[in-house]
Image (tube, grey):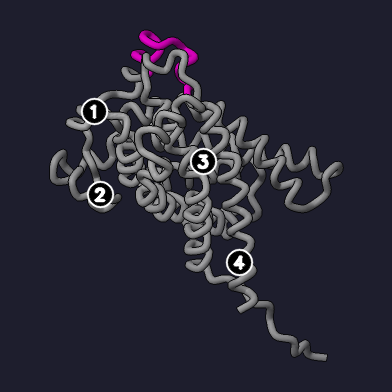
């Protein structure tokens, strides 16, 4: 007997990209204060001695008010719209090609695909990243040195006009490097933590939460030195190599300065992973149920 039941509704590929980007943008709205705090701490340099995340947060609140924590939000959202969409699109394209040519990929091959896609997405998103770093850092500069970008598009336009198009990709190499490290650490750790915790916690949001936080801790520790170097390179008035910036940090501030801002980084990466997947699942369900 023929099966006359309608085929289950599926999500078109381009809708997956849109939903992925929207999920990242919604999560960014929640974690933006932690991201700004992380950037401010990374840029303290020698001033960082004796300053905690709490003291820096109090300084932002005192000088800029509550909305000071959302400076650069438009750049953060634009970064998600470019980086997250580019990463997901690249990963799905590579995955589909591999399946067609060689069959189902192994776990190690998926990690390699994730690293590659992360690098591609990061390169696409570097202009937004440069704008985000500059906008979030502006408040700590003396008034006469502030760039005072109005929004991400104003920042992009002024960077091109004042410094040239190539300035949009300043720090592209450490940005791509960081993205590859993040993807490798996050994917591998999350998968392993999920596997170990599943028998105890069972399927559900609690398992996802704990796995994400463990992955966030490892990812923060692994990626923060690269992230700090990337931030310093992108803030430099003139082109600087990441090796030169790294050696300068270690020489003048000590090795542990490479993990400056660890707490706000952890606070950002863990919840951002959780919220992104929660929003992703809800948006998928909303599309399938309409």
For residue 284, which numbered disc appears in the image?
A: 4
Q: Would residue 290 appear left or right of 119 to someone viewing this image?
A: right
**Residue 252 is one of the magenta-drawn residues:** yes
The magenta segment is 246-260
Residue at (35% x, 42% y) in the render = 132
Residue 60 vs 28, above or below: the answer is: above
Q: Nearer the viewer, mark 1 or mark 4?
A: 1
For residue 142, which numbered disc appears in the image?
A: 1
Question: Pointers 1 and 4 in contact (CB under 8 A)?
Answer: no
Distance from Cα at disc 3 to Cα at disc 1: 39 Å
Residue 197 vs 55, above or below: the answer is: below
Residue 276 vs 264, above or below: the answer is: below
Which is more toward the observer, 107 or 264? Answer: 264
Q: Would residue 12 appear left or right of 58 to someone viewing this image?
A: right
Q: Nearer the viewer, mark 3 or mark 1?
A: 1
Residue at (47% x, 41% y) in the render = 33
């Amino acid at each position: 007997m023929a099966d006359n039941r309608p085929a289950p509704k599926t999500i078109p590929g381009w809708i997956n990209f849109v939903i992925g980007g929207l999920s990242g943008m919604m999560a960014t709205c929640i974690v933006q204060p932690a991201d700004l705090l992380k950037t401010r701490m990374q840029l303290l340099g020698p001033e960082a001695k004796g300053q905690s995340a709490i003291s820096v947060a109090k300084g932002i609140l005192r000088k800029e008010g509550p909305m000071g924590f959302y400076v650069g939000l438009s750049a953060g959202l634009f970064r998600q719209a470019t980086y997250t969409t580019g990463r997901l699109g690249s990963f799905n394209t590579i995955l589909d090609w591999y399946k067609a040519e060689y069959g189902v990929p192994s776990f190690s091959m998926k990690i390699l695909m994730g690293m590659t896609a992360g690098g591609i997405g990061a390169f696409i998103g570097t202009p937004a990243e440069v704008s985000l770093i500059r906008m979030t850092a502006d408040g700590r500069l003396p008034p006469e040195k502030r760039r005072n970008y109005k929004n991400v598009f104003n920042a992009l336009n002024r960077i091109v006009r004042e410094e040239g198009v190539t300035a949009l990709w300043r720090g592209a190499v450490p940005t791509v490097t960081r993205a590859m490290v993040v993807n490798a650490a996050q994917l591998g750790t999350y998968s392993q933590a999920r596997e170990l915790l599943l028998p105890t916690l069972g399927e559900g949001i609690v398992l996802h939460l704990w796995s994400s936080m463990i992955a966030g801790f490892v990812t923060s520790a692994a990626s923060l030195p690269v992230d700090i170097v990337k931030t310093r390179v992108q803030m430099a008035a003139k082109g600087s190599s990441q090796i030169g910036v790294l050696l300068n940090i270690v020489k003048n501030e000590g090795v542990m300065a490479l993990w400056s801002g660890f707490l706000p980084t952890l606070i950002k990466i863990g919840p951002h992973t959780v919220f992104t997947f929660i929003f992703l699942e809800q948006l998928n369900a909303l599309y399938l149920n309409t």
